[in-house]
Amino acid sequence: MKKNGSKNRNVCLIPSSAHGTNPASAQMVGMKVVVVNCDSLGNVDYEDLKKKAEEYSDTLAALMVTYPSTHGVFEEKITDICDLIHKHGGQVYMDGANLNALVGIAKPGNFGPDVCHINLHKTFCIPHGGGGPGMGPIACKKHLEVYLPTHPIIDCGPASGIGAISAAPWGSSSILSISWMYIKMMGSEGLKLATQNAILNANYIAHKLKDHFPILYKGKNGNVAHECIIDIRKIKSETGITEEDIAKRLIDFGFHAPTMSWPVPGTMMIEPTESESLSEINRFCETLIKIKEEINKVKDGTFDKIDNPLKNAPHTHVELTANEWKHKYEREIAAYPSATLKSYKYWPPVARVDNVYGDKNLFCSCPSMDEYKETAA
Ligand SMILES: *Cc1c(COP(=O)(O)O)cnc(C)c1O
């Protein structure tokens, strides 16, 4: 920016669908974050983007855009969006976390972004979180090459570079070797197939669930990208059952719940990826449909509004095997809501810990702190 004669380009436009890491990164480097709205299909609202790009034309530094977006749709105007930002003197940073929907089938460089990071722990197999720091290459267009990092000990990067950004100039070799092996073993055909399967799996789930839970965002052709968002807000207002109750009930069925209330509060974002088998995806969909039937029973009064298997989920082995059963529904419904659970059952070790409602004796099956102390003594 300085090189182009601009002194105060510090505005970073970020669509409201962005991951929190986007505004956090921009803010950390002293940029002013301006949020761009999304339309009812989940796309960046192009008119709002245009208005803000014009408004901040003198101070616009960058747009951070995720493609496909966290709303699970392929932003249709991505090329126009990039052109617009360039026209107003900004650079486009593409959040590459959703590369799982692009590898082998699209070339992000051609849409117009200038920089893109590749989350190896998303698309290229390295463990997330506890398996080591999230890391990965940051790719840029040729005109930014002169600003790439250098290193004081290992000779790399351009003379005009920005200095070292990490202890090891190309990142951690012990982690990177995992991604390297994954790419080698998959091959170009395998990587492409993984992308196709990730998109197919998300669409399969969206189509299986659409009559039971509204799919919040879809593209013009009625399809989603690599993930789909199911909307729980109407269920919540009609029955009092929340996305959290569904997440907890999934544990009784042996599932770890999908992402809750992100990027839209009151929803669940389901991203199956390519790695789940068809039978597991079917089991997951059947479970959510079963849970919807339970919700219907709350709605029509078959289940109590408060003392029902959803509000009390997950049910621990201690509660399920206790002499006394205090709930207004059968013990069997709590433990074995589907027949397959009789041959394979996950036994939740703890009930809800931090969110106990009303009468503790009725709703909390875990011992109190005093009871813990007694056992420990
Ligand atoms: C996961 C994700 C990130 C951040 O990834 P880290 O796991 O924090 O490295 C950024 N943007 C999007 C869209 C993501 O899904």
Image (cartoon, helix red, strand yellow):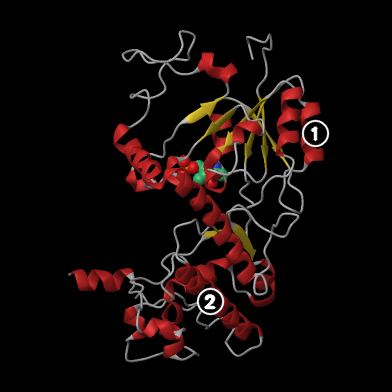
Inspect this view and state whether residue 326 appears: no
Q: Note whether 58 is above or below 25 in the view shown.
A: above
The residue that appears at 40% across and 81% down in the rendered structure is 341
| Residue 42, placed above or below residue 307 | above
Q: Considering only vertical position in the picture, is 228 above or below 68?
A: below
Give the mark, 2 or 1, whose residue is nearer the N terminus.
1
- Toward the viewer: 75 or 8? 75
The answer to whether 302 appears left or right of 137 in the picture is right
Report the disc number at residue 240: none
Q: Is residue 223 left or right of residue 129?
A: right
Residue lying at 57% horizontally and 82% vertically, measured from the top left: 294
Mark 1 residue crowding within 10 angstroms, few (<14) / some (14–19) / many (20+): some
Between the residue at mark 2 and the residue at mark 1, the CA separation in whole angstroms equals 44 Å
Amino acid carrying label 2: it is: Glu
Q: How far across and down, in percent of the image, does residue 187 sit?
A: 42, 44
The amino acid sitting under disc 1 is Lys
- Residue indicated by mark 1: 50
Q: Which mark is residue 286?
A: 2
Front: mark 2 or 1? 2
Query: Does the beta carbon of the residue at mark 1 sit less than 8 Å from ligand 1?
Result: no
Which is more toward the observer, 101 or 368? 101
Element class at badge 2? helix
Q: Is residue 14 left or right of residue 312?
A: right
Please tell me which residue lies in front, 114 or 19.
114
Whether residue 57 can be seen here: yes
- Residue 271 screen position, x and y as percent: 53, 57
State the quadrant of the N terminus: top right
- Whole-percent x, y for residue 51 in the image: 82, 33
Residue 285: quadrant of the picture: bottom right
Image quadrant containing the C terminus? bottom left
Q: Secondary structure at mark 1?
A: helix
Q: In the rendered view, would you say 183 is above or below 297? A: above
